[in-house]
């Protein structure tokens, strides 16, 4: 497998992972819906449909997150509280070359 193919695959995975992590609280609603429907009708078709729609929405949200620069802002927020980044930014090597947002 070529590096370019691996890169494209992992980029798609990153989109999904970001959306999944951002909307992870909705999983519990899907589980509760599935349990309620499973006990009531013995059919899981509706829950499966909700799960598929949820997975697609996770991917699309993650793609939006990357394409519109939100990932850079998220990393900058993380860097504000990262002690190593504080030391690097305060070091004479940086000499004011990079400033916080």
Image (spheres, helix red, strand yellow):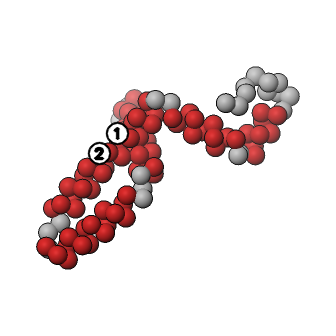
Q: Residue furthest right?
A: 92
- For the residues labelled 1 and 2, say whether their Cβ atoms are less than 8 Å apart: yes
- Per the rendering, the mark at residue 37 is none
Above/below status of 73 relative to 95: below
- Residue topped by disc 1: 60
Badge 1 density bin: few <14, some 14–19, many ≥20, Cα 10 Å: some
Q: Kindly state the secondary structure of the residue where label 1 is placed.
A: helix
State the separation of the CA atoms marked 1 and 2.
6 Å
Q: Residue at x 78, y 35 (%)?
A: 88
The quarter in which the C terminus is drawn is top right
Q: Kindly state the secondary structure of the residue where label 2 is placed.
A: helix
Answer with left or right where residue 40 lies relative to residue 67. left
Task: Give the percent coordinates (x, y) of residue 64.
Answer: 40, 34
Looking at the image, can residue 6 be seen? no
Task: Give the percent coordinates (x, y) of residue 80.
Answer: 70, 41
Q: Which quarter of the figure has residue 11?
A: top left
Task: Give the percent coordinates (x, y) of residue 14.
Answer: 43, 41
Above/below status of 39 relative to 55: below
Badge 2 density bin: few <14, some 14–19, many ≥20, Cα 10 Å: some
- Per the rendering, the mark at residue 56 is 2
Q: Residue at x 14, y 74 (%)?
A: 42
Above/below status of 42 relative to 79: below
Above/below status of 87 relative to 22: above
Q: Which quarter of the figure has residue 35?
A: bottom left
Q: Residue at x 45, y 51 (%)?
A: 21
Q: Residue furthest top?
A: 97
Answer with left or right where residue 5 lies relative to residue 93. left
Q: Residue at x 35, y 42 (%)?
A: 59
Task: Give the percent coordinates (x, y) of residue 41.
Answer: 13, 73
């Amino acid at each position: 497998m070529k590096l370019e193919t691996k890169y494209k695959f992992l980029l798609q995975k990153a989109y999904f992972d970001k959306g999944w992590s951002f909307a992870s609280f909705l999983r519990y609603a899907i589980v509760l819906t599935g349990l309620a429907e499973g006990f009531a009708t013995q059919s899981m078709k509706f829950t499966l449909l909700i799960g598929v729609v949820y997975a697609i929405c996770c991917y699309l949200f993650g793609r939006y997150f990357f394409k519109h620069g939100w990932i850079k802002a998220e990393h900058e927020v993380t860097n504000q509280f990262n002690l190593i980044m504080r030391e690097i930014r305060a070091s004479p090597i940086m000499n004011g070359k990079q400033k916080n947002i």
